[in-house]
């Protein structure tokens, strides 16, 4: 089964989609695709078949997203916790991923014509080398596509991602690229695997479980979270519409909460910068108070220098990450 499903919606689906599109549509939707094994058990199928049908449902969901003008989708395909499943199941999921990334590389024309950029987010070092290479090739070959984005979280948990982002900032400090005082919420966000994406507007978990299971914890503090009881392989267009309606009903309060958070974050940043500048001036002025104009100038200068430092650090980080993928690709060719 292909990643890209062509084809129109049926008449009723089209009609519903056009009504929904009169309201706010999420730009970025995240899915915890849960319930594959229960689906298999319910239908007397092998567990692998449940995961395979889970993948097919993902391809179908991406088609609905396209028709609803949703440009970005993030899915939880394999959690670091999933490594604790039986050897058989883990190997089965790795094999499924292998097959699907091989298929993806064969479908490059389709991905190009639809402008699909594939990103894989997670600690790829935990995966078999051949799978790392397939993933790296898929990521590198689609990285300039910019019409829609599919982020596949693989060997991922949110806590691992946050700990990794903190390590990256510590690396920046150690290399002298940034100062400890440059560490902020905003900088941490830039160091996450998701740094290229806006936060999800809507997070959907299927199968009736009402937990986040360590998925996008940092990114979803102002997202609409919808739990649905349907098992992932049975997820329907109508289930998806229901989740979008839930988002639309909560849209204005979510927007307000986001704006408030942004204002507070900007204010906190400015206060931190003022405190740094005051400390510097006290140090250089032997404790004498500086006039307001000098304080203002020093603050402006501090902000410019900090922004330059942070930009250089982020460039270095990007280079490090790009090299990781390029090295994997060059091992193949
Ligand atoms: C959760 O259901 C699902 C998974 C752990 C795997 C999800 C993977 C896919 C849908 C395939 C995606 C593959 C690629 C390459 C993108 P579960 O196994 O926890 O089922 P249960 O909740 O019924 O036990
Ligand atoms: Mg599960």
Image (tube, rainbow, N blue to C red):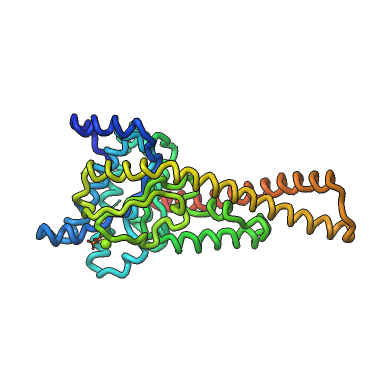
Determine the residue positioned at 84% across, 60% down: 283
Q: Is residue 26 above or below residue 314?
A: above
Left or right: residue 318 versus residue 61 is: right
Q: How many marks?
A: 0
Q: Is residue 228 left or right of residue 25?
A: left
Residue 226 percent location from the top left of the image: 33, 51
Residue 239 visible in this rendered orientation of the protein: yes
156 on left or right of 162: left
Q: At which x and y percent is residue 252?
A: 44, 41
Image quadrant containing the N terminus: top left
The quadrant where residue 157 appears: bottom left
Can residue 134 be seen in the rendering of this structure?
no
| Residue 265 location (% of width, % of height) | 59, 51
Examine the image and state in which quarter residue 115 appears. top left
Q: Quadrant of residue 41?
A: bottom left
Q: Nearer the viewer, residue 305 or 16?
A: 16
Across and down, in percent, residue 69 comes to 35, 34
* The image quadrant in which ligand 1 is located: bottom left
Residue 275 or 232: which is nearer the viewer? 275
Q: Is residue 110 above or below residue 260?
A: above
Residue shown at the point (45%, 45%) measured from the top left: 253
């Amino acid at each position: 089964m292909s990643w890209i499903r062509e084809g129109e919606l049926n008449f009723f689906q089209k009609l519903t989609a056009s009504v929904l599109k009169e309201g706010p549509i999420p730009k970025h939707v995240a899915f915890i695709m849960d319930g594959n094994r229960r689906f298999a058990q319910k239908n007397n199928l092998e567990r692998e078949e449940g995961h395979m049908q889970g993948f097919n449902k993902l391809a179908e969901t991406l088609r609905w997203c396209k028709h609803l003008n949703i440009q970005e989708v993030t899915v939880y395909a394999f959690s670091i916790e999933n490594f604790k499943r039986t050897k058989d199941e883990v190997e089965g999921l790795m094999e499924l991923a292998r097959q699907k990334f091989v298929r993806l590389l064969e479908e490059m024309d389709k991905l190009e014509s639809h402008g699909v950029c594939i990103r894989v987010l997670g600690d790829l070092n935990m995966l078999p080398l051949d799978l790392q290479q397939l993933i790296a090739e898929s990521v590198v070959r689609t990285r300039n596509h910019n019409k829609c984005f599919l982020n596949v979280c693989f060997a991922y948990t949110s806590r691992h991602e946050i700990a990794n982002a903190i390590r990256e900032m510590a690396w920046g400090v150690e290399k002298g690229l940034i100062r400890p005082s440059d560490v902020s919420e905003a900088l941490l966000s830039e160091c996450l695997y998701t740094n290229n994406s806006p936060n999800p507007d809507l997070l959907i978990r299927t199968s009736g479980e009402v937990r986040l299971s360590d998925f996008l914890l940092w990114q979803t503090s102002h997202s609409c979270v919808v739990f649905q009881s349907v098992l992932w392989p049975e997820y329907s267009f109508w289930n998806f519409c229901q989740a979008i309606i839930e988002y639309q009903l909560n849209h204005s309060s979510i927007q307000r909460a986001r704006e408030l958070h942004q204002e507070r974050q900007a204010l906190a940043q400015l206060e931190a910068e003022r405190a740094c500048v005051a400390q510097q001036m006290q140090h250089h002025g032997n404790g004498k108070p500086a006039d307001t104009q000098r304080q203002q100038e020093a603050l402006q200068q501090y902000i410019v220098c900090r922004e330059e430092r942070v930009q250089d650090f982020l460039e270095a980080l990007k280079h490090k990450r790009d090299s990781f993928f390029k090295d994997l690709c060059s091992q193949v060719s």
